[in-house]
Amino acid sequence: MDLSLIIMQLLSGIALGAVLVITALGLTIVFGMLGVVNFAHGALFMIGAYAGLYLASLTGSFWWGLLLAPILIGAFGMLIEFVLIRRLYGRSIDDPLLLTFGLSYILVEGVRIVFGSDGIPFPTPPQLIGVLDLGIGFFPRYRLFVIVLVAVVLLALWLTLEKTRVGLIVRAGARDPTIMQVLGVDIGRVWLAIFGLGVGLAALGGVLAGPMRSVNPEMGSLVLAEAFVVTVIGGLGSIVGAVVAGLMVGISISLVALFAPEMATIVMFALMAVVLLIRPQGLFGVRGRTA
Amino acid sequence: MPKSGSTLRISRRTALAGLSASAALLAMPRLGRAADETIRIGFPTPLTGPFAAEARDQVKCAELAVKLVNDKGGIGGRKVELLVRDDKLNAGEAATRTLELIEKDKVHAVVGALSSAVQLAVNEVTRARGVIYVSISQSDTINEAKDFSKYTFHEALNPHMTTAAVARQTLKKGMKVAHLVADYAYGHEMLRGFKRAQTAIGAESVGEILHPFGAADYSTFMPRLMSMRPDVLCISNFGRDQANAIKQAVDFGIKQQMKIVVPVILHNQRLAVGPDVFEGVVGGANYYWGLETQSKSAAAFNTAFKAANGGAIPTDYGAYGYSGVGSLLAAMQAAGGTDTDKVIDALEKLQYDLTKGPQHYRKCDHQSVQSVLVLESKKKSAMAGDNDLFAILANDAGSDGMLRTCSELGHAT
């Protein structure tokens, strides 16, 4: 087995991990800040892909779809928070879980009614069609783009949360909402923005996955399971955890695919089991924290 | 005279009215009885999940076959009813639904199942209960003595037939072949078929990768496949797996290095990913609507389907729903009812031509002997319209020669 093959394989794993990271990130932010286990995350990922496709065909450019779909679906997420989720804060964790679970069914059926249950072609943007010669092998341009874009989004997100006043309020609000209210911060607006951000990230993941996988109403269900595995491995609510675990899962799947391809999907769950045995709170999780 | 004329007219009217009334009265108990004796066909199929597009087409076509028979007055005056159940692409679910169809709904026969593993589960149940099962999903083992029963009929093509036809069109002596295979019964059987065909041709296998069934991402298999440097890549999977695997192979530039072939090229998956991705991919098929220029029955089937479905065209796996239910109903018609042994006898003797040319069930293993199409996906610029998807490379007429022999399958000859 030569080195170039292993490097190509690693790169495939990182590209796969990048989509996992962006999707798991939305899930973990919403859980970490709001304590809401969002079971509609996969459905919103799927809606994001459809919105991206629709906006791309409307404007004639993939780039508008990529830019506008996460914003639009993020706004839709805010509407969901404002109308539905908000009423359930302070109640048991099961209530929003069941609500979002039901919501996911409604969203999937809605898409089935509007767009049908067959897959829809999502063409790769013309600038990113084809492969790039890396010297050791060929790699799809689009997947390289996904890796770069996810890195940029992560950097922007990290800077916002760590270096800005908005980030400070968000982090403080997650730790002690009451004190924040006493200090005159409208915590409701913070929660609204966080939920919108989480949903927007799911939609971004969906648009990015569109040109790689076929776009269909069920595309979110598998992603939801993967995102949960990543979130659990990384530690519930941990942003760093989601990034590290996402890449870990992608690379593990990829390397296992090289030696035992039929085990490629199972490895993710095996990894989760091992991590939970050694560190039940996940790699970067905080012990005993539920919300 | 006018008076008597009018009395005559009245009396004739009265007589006519009386006659028709008594006729209706006489017919009523028969109608009542006939309604009780509706012929019920169970139809398990995966309405949800990655094969849902193909499953829905099967239902539409099966319903069409039932409608056409009912429009002609049913079978011996008995109406036919199709009982569709979602098997969720799960063998256990399918077995439960089939058992329910037999025990609770008292179906007279079962047609359906779209996954090879699921169809074998349905076959177990129908075999144990002595109910006729017309299978419409590809399998080789269902014809073998181990899985076979006198109640089992296989309307679909089988992997042996499709892979041989595709290999004949695409492989040459000395070619190197790599395989990407879904890790379940369908994939295994298709791989076996391809390997057998390539050995006969003199092509060489350079490697095979089994992928998990229902995977969304195939990118991790691509570097390894490319490092094998084959001339041909055979992708043996089904439904959405086919669309995703081909799309991602194309993304990795595989088509510049090798030809992609599939045992069964799917109409719906070609639609789901678009012409650019599928361009040049070759695969086998039981049916393609474009056959209508060569076959009168295809033209008639297309017309009937369009009329019933708002102008839509029938697809490959949909056609199985039509020919599977259609052949069963034709045999019931010939047997004069639903008596299982008589219908089996009629199916074994049946010569039918519903979608593409003559077909019959071979006596030893109940495999439908039928033509096999080999299709190539057209490039976008060569398409005459949205539905002009494939060029027909070959239309091999049905013959016993394309099947394994009865003794090879373990049947007494």
Image (tube, rainbow, N blue to C red):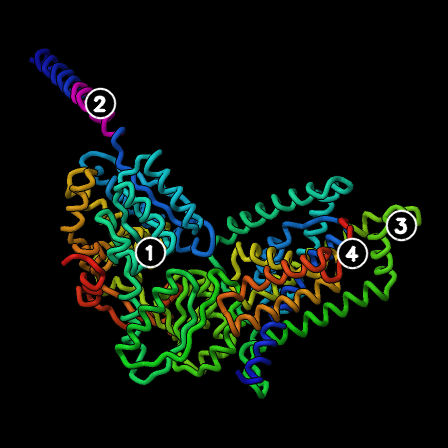
What's the residue type where badge 3 is placed?
A: Met
Q: How many marks?
A: 4
Which is more toward the observer, B344 or A158? B344
Judge whether A242 appears above or below B204 on screen.
Answer: above
Disc on res. A286: 4
Helix, strand or loop for disc 4: loop
Magenta stretch in the rendered image:
B21-35
Instruction: From the image, tell me which residue sits under label 3.
Output: A180
Q: Indicate the quadrant where residue B6 lies.
A: top left
Subunit of mark 3?
Answer: A
Rounded to the nearest whole Å, what is the CA distance between mark 1 and mark 2? 42 Å
Which of the two labelled residues, at mark 4 and mark 3, occupies the earlier sequence position? Answer: 3
The x and y percentages for residue A32 are: 76, 54
Which three-letter amino acid code belongs to the residue tagged 4? Val
| First of labels 1, 2 by sequence position | 2
Q: Which numbered marker is on residue B137?
A: 1
Specify the subunit that label 4 lies on: A
Vertical placement of residue B378 versus A177, above or below: below
- Comparing A135 with A265, the one in front is A265
Q: Is residue A111 left or right of residue A74?
A: left
Which amino acid type corresponds to the residue marked 1 in the rendered image?
Ser
Q: Secondary structure at mark 3?
A: helix
Label 1 vs label 4, nearer the camera: 4
Residue contact at pointers 3 and 1, CB within 8 angstroms: no
Front label number (3 vs 1): 1
Give the label, 2 or 4, closer to the camera.
4
**Crowd tier of the residue under label 1, counting other residues whose Cα lies within 10 Å: few below 14, some 14–19, many 20 or above:** many
Q: What's the distance in space between the residues labelled 3 and 1, CA to CA?
A: 62 Å
Residues marked 1 and 4 touching at CB (< 8 Å):
no
Which dot marks residue B55?
none
What secondary structure is the magenta-colored segment mainly? helix
Specify the subunit that label 2 lies on.
B
